[in-house]
Image: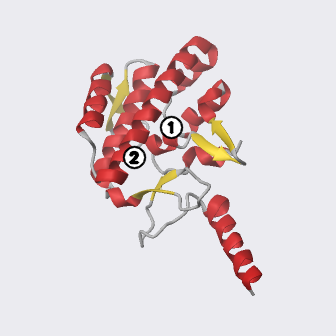
Amino acid sequence: MNKSLFLLGGTAWINLVNTSYISENQNIDILIEPSNTLQWLQKNNLLRESDFQALKKEDKMLNSLTVELQSLRDLSKMILSDLEQQGKLSLNVTEQLKRLTKQVKVSLTIDSESDKLELVYEGLTTREHVLYMIIHSIIKTLNTIPTHRIRNCEHPECLLYFVDTSKSGKRRWCSMKLCGNRQKAADFYARKKKK
């Protein structure tokens, strides 16, 4: 499995959508394997150290969180579908997001590790912390990124999404390394074949 996929989306909720993809004509789901799920959570900075240790020790807790992540991935896919079709969220998706948000309890703490004090919201439990972080990612993205900058990779065999943060706003591929070069090589050989 290619672990560089863990962060291609540019934001946690899109990275969550990208945990389900196609590789070599096979459906891959990162969230099926507990160790991959844990690595994905860690790479996306969704866990505090105490959360990581608790999930490493308790398979039942990790399995339960995985079910929550799969459900949130489905909701995130619905958000992307709404954005593609309507440019905004449907009432149904908004209501689902509100219901999920009501389930999450957070506390306010102060981060004093840097030179400046900073207010930080943290979930009360591991589950709530992870869900809060992903919900926060959704809301922040929708409030700060124009919807046309949230896109699907243009490679015909790729299902991955990303936030286009390029200056020109013309990014086409989830990754030049994965899809861009593959498409450019295919185009080159197609042109060569025509000659």
Applied colour scheme: secondary structure
Q: Where on the picture, by quarter, is residue 27?
A: top right
**Quarter that holds the N terminus:** top right
**Mark 2 residue element:** helix
**Quarter that holds the C terminus:** bottom right
Say which label, 2 or 1, has the lower sequence index.
1
Q: Residue at x 67, y 67 (%)?
A: 181
Q: Amino acid at mark 2?
A: Leu
Circle on res. 80: 2
Q: Where on the picture, by quarter, is residue 61?
A: top right
Q: Residue at x 70, y 47 (%)?
A: 25
Q: On the picture, is 43 further left or further right than 170?
A: right
Q: How far across and how far down the image is residue 56, in percent?
A: 62, 19
Q: Residue at x 70, y 81 (%)?
A: 191
Q: How far across and how far down the image is residue 193, in percent?
A: 76, 80
Pick the residue in front: 77 or 37.
77
